[in-house]
Amino acid sequence: MAKKCPSRTIGGEPCKGNPLPGRPYCLAHDPEAADRRAEGSRKGGEARANAKRAARQWAAIGEQLSPAQLPAMLRACLISVRDGTMEPAQASAIATLAKTSVSITNEIEMEQRITALEAIIDPTRDPKIRRIG
């Protein structure tokens, strides 16, 4: 059976973490790993902050862009990352938002097309009622 960290959780339960190599404690409880924990916490905070900044930027410019303009905007993000003027995580968040935007736009367009076709097939049918099967 693998040895576990001898510490206790905040709830008083035995820690289930595996000890760090050559150490008796896991990363969360090892007093000598405080710097590593702080660095991980800092990086996590930065990642969340980058995503929030990207979301704000996207909200500011997203409505001003047409789907045809998205590739140019993403290329500009790529160049900004290359030049060091934008964090990679921020550009990644913008790319994810762009992909989601395109996906939603496509779904809305497809739904409108299906509704229009159904109206041609059965003009008496209520478009708000969806049939299954």
Image: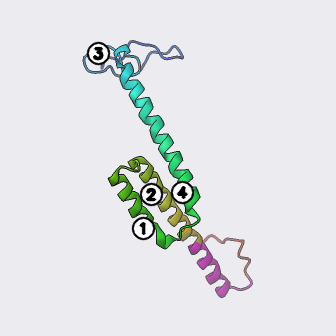
- Helix, strand or loop for disc 1: helix
- Determine contact: label 3, label 1, CB under 8 Å: no
Q: Residue at x 32, y 19 (%)?
A: 19
Residue that carries the numbered disc 4 in the rendered image: 58
Q: Which residue type does callout 2 highlight?
A: Ala
Dominant secondary-structure state across the stretch colored magenta: helix
- Note whether 9 is above or below 63 in the view shown: above
Q: Find residue 1 and report its horizontal and vertical position in percent.
A: 30, 19
Q: Find residue 39 and report its horizontal and vertical position in percent.
A: 39, 28
Residue that carries the numbered disc 1 in the rendered image: 72
Q: Which residue type does callout 1 highlight?
A: Ala
Q: Earlier in the sequence, mark 4 or mark 1?
A: 4
Q: Which residue type does callout 3 highlight?
A: Arg
Q: Which residue type does callout 4 highlight?
A: Trp
Q: Find residue 87 and report its horizontal and vertical position in percent.
A: 40, 47
Of circles 1 and 2, the one toward us is 1
Q: Is residue 2 left or right of residue 109?
A: left
